[in-house]
């Protein structure tokens, strides 16, 4: 599944899932553009790891919550040529039951996941379309499909991302660009490990374990490949049978 010659942006590459997807796409031949904001040292280390393994990686540090910063970063990325794979992985949790949710909790979660998708995908899309080949992968969540107590903001953001996936896929399908969403369940990461203990996972997940970031990355690698050219507009779950 060669992505040789393709450039791939992974937002939120400083997290466990983003890093795994970046490593997979780099292994498949893509030059990966590793986005971070608050933890630039994480993507610098990841870039070094990818380079040491024979891959190609660059770091792009900017605030996805800023229209201006995102626009400047996208212009800079396009100086190196079109970005033909976009993985909208950046997202944040700020959980609270709705009666106790502060406005800033609502706006922050929506801003990163949903507005962040717009801020990078919109400026990078036309150059991608001109190449008549592209892959847009939006990292959603099982919470977008089932809901989750204390995560009305997160479920709303990811549910909107699912709908945007379906609509955008119709706009670009004739140009050789596919748009799909991946909806992971409980995936092992420092963030998840602090929320879900073994007993809870055994109760919630039929396969009795958390997923591995590499398993989600394998799905992303397939969807980014030529072999997945006839799959578009889909929300694909990877959750160990939770739903």
Image: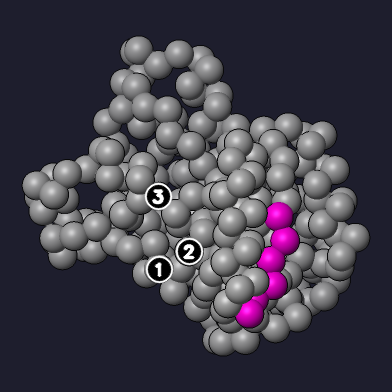
Residue 234 lies, in percent from the top left, at 48, 65
Residue 73 lies, in percent from the top left, at 80, 47
Please tell me whether the stretch drawn in magenta is mainly helix, strand or loop. strand
Q: CB under 8 Å between callouts 1 and 2? A: yes
Q: Is residue 39 above or below residue 225?
A: above
The secondary structure type at the circle numbered 3 is loop
Query: Which residue is at a point 57% across and 49% down the rendered structure image?
Result: 42
Pointer 3 residue: 141
Query: Which residue is at a point 77% across and 59% down the rendered structure image?
Result: 125
Number of residues whose C-alpha sits closer than 10 Å to that of mark 3, classed few (under 14), some (14–19) or many (20 or more):
many
Sequence-earlier tag: 3 or 1: 3
Query: Which residue is at a point 35% across and 12% down the rendered structure image?
Result: 100
User: Could you give the CA–CA distance between mark 1 and mark 2, rounded to whole angstroms?
Assistant: 6 Å
Query: Which residue is at a point 37% across and 27% down the rendered structure image?
Result: 95
Pointer 1 residue: 214
Number of residues whose C-alpha sits closer than 10 Å to that of mark 2, classed few (under 14), some (14–19) or many (20 or more):
many
Q: Is residue 226 above or below residue 36?
A: below
User: Could you give the CA–CA distance between mark 3 and mark 1, rounded to whole angstroms?
Assistant: 16 Å
Sequence-earlier tag: 1 or 2: 2
Q: CB under 8 Å between callouts 2 and 3? A: no
State the quadrant of the N terminus: bottom right
The secondary structure type at the circle numbered 2 is helix
The secondary structure type at the circle numbered 1 is helix
């Amino acid at each position: 599944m060669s992505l040789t010659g393709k450039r791939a942006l992974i937002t939120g590459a400083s997290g466990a899932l983003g890093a795994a997807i970046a490593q997979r796409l780099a292994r498949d031949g893509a030059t990966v553009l590793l986005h971070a904001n608050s933890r630039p040292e994480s993507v610098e280390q990841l870039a070094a790891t990818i380079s040491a393994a024979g891959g190609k990686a660059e770091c792009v540090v900017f605030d996805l919550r800023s229209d201006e910063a995102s626009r400047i970063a996208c212009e800079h990325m396009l100086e190196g040529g079109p970005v033909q794979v976009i993985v909208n992985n950046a997202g944040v949790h700020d959980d609270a039951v709705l009666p106790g949710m502060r406005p800033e909790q609502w706006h922050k979660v929506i801003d990163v996941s949903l507005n962040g998708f717009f801020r990078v995908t919109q400026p990078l899309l036309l150059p991608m379309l001109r190449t008549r080949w592209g892959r847009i992968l939006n990292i959603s969540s099982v919470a977008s499909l089932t809901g989750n107590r204390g995560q009305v903001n997160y479920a709303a953001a990811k549910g909107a991302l699912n709908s945007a996936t379906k609509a955008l896929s119709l706009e670009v399908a004739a140009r050789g660009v596919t748009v799909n969403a991946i909806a992971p369940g409980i995936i092992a990461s420092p963030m998840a490990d602090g929320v879900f203990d073994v007993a809870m996972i055994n109760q919630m997940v039929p396969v009795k374990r958390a997923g591995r970031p590499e398993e989600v990355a394998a799905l992303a690698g397939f969807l980014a490949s030529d072999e997945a050219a006839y799959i578009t507009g889909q929300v694909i779950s990877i959750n160990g049978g939770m739903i």
